[in-house]
């Protein structure tokens, strides 16, 4: 597993394992256990997923030293709006069974995110968070945050996949030294992106699955992808991407699939 360096010097594993929509209990515990067995050391959860406790159980069961793991969780919108950052953070710590979080993100740019960020800066300065960031922030959200913040976000976790590559936002973040993570990097549940003939053709060319091709595309764009699965074979397959390199023409081919069509909600127009 390669690592990437955040703006504050913290090292993050270059592929994360996501647990969005993974059911709490055995489904999440098994998925995380398999991920850790496969070599993932970066687990991405959120309080709204309802499975922080299951992630914590799997992490504890693994016996892997804490400093070899990178755990991300997120501050939910209602906690932002009601100014409950401290309480929400402590609850996540309790759920996960940890005494610090490697990366804590504002999940969506809900009203009051600027105030929430100030509290997160305090938690960071106390050492309870190793890195702070945001998720689903557009350029204008980042500029609004910059006006009031002492710390620039170290990460922006956003939607990015072959039909919605979100490249303009990625370019902005790179220029600002904000690392970009890609959620639903394969398109998400219910999409048919991995069945696109161009990706199937590239899979045959490199003797890899379409999913592996897309994950490699993200890596070669300088992103940290967060693939998710509850199937052991796919969990192992999704991380097996370090033995080949896409050539520049194939990167351009995948770039050309972009249709600017979101799979998830629009950060400028969400109602949750």
Image (spheres, helix red, strand yellow):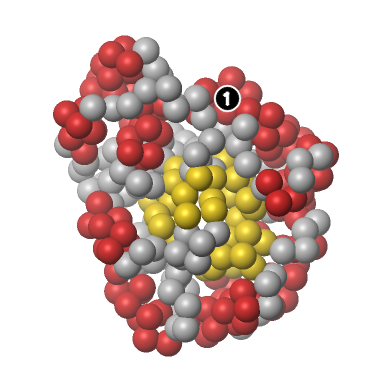
Q: Is residue 5 visible?
A: yes
- Residue 27 versus residue 197 in the image, above or below: below
- Residue 241 versus residue 22 in the image, above or below: above
Looking at the image, residue 98 sits to the left or right of residue 179; the answer is right
Looking at the image, residue 87 sits to the left or right of residue 190; the answer is right
**Outermost residue, front side:** 9
Q: Residues within 10 Å of mark 1 (few under 14, many from 20)?
A: some
Residue at x 76%, y 45% (from the top left corner): 65
Give the quarter of the figure containing the N terminus: top right
Residue at x 63%, y 28% (from the top left corner): 38
Looking at the image, residue 116 sits to the left or right of residue 195; the answer is right
Please name whichever residue, 77 or 244, is drawn nearer the observer in this view of the structure. 244
- Residue 220 versus residue 37 in the image, above or below: below
What is the x, y in percent for residue 136? 41, 61
Identify the image quadrant of residue 216.
top left
What is the x, y in percent for residue 81? 55, 79
Identify the image quadrant of residue 196.
top left
What is the x, y in percent for residue 80? 56, 76
Labels in figure, total: 1
- Residue 100 versus residue 167 in the image, above or below: below
Q: Is residue 257 visible?
A: no
Looking at the image, residue 190 sits to the left or right of residue 268; the answer is right
Residue at x 74%, y 50% (from the top left corner): 66
Residue position for label 1: 236
Residue at x 32%, y 77% (from the top left corner): 143
Please name whichever residue, 206 or 254, is drawn nearer the observer in this view of the structure. 206
What is the x, y in percent for residue 176? 32, 67
Callout 1: helix, strand or loop?
helix
């Amino acid at each position: 597993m390669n690592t990437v360096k955040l703006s504050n010097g913290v090292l993050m594993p270059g592929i994360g394992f996501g647990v969005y929509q993974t059911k709490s209990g055995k489904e999440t515990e098994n998925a995380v256990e398999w991920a850790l067995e496969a070599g993932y050391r970066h687990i991405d959860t959120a309080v709204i997923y309802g499975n922080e406790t299951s992630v914590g159980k799997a992490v504890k069961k693994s016996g892997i030293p804490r400093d070899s793991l990178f755990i991300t969780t997120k501050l939910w919108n209602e906690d932002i709006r009601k100014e409950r950052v401290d309480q929400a953070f402590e609850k996540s710590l309790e759920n996960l069974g940890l005494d610090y979080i490697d990366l804590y993100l504002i999940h969506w740019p809900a009203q009051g995110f600027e105030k929430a960020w100030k509290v997160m800066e305090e938690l960071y300065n106390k050492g309870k968070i190793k890195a702070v960031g945001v998720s689903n922030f557009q350029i204008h959200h980042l500029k609004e945050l910059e006006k009031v913040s002492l710390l620039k976000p170290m990460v922006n976790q956003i939607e990015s996949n072959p039909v919605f590559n979100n490249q303009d936002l990625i370019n902005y973040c790179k220029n600002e030294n904000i690392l970009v993570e890609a959620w639903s990097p394969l398109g998400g549940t219910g999409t048919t992106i991995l069945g696109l003939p161009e990706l199937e053709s590239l899979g045959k060319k490199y003797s890899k699955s379409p999913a592996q091709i897309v994950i490699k595309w993200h890596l070669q764009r300088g992103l940290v992808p967060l693939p998710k699965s509850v199937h052991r074979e796919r969990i192992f397959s999704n991380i097996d991407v370090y033995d080949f390199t896409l050539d520049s023409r194939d990167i351009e081919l995948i770039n050309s699939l972009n249709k600017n069509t979101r799979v998830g909600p629009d950060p400028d127009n969400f109602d949750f």
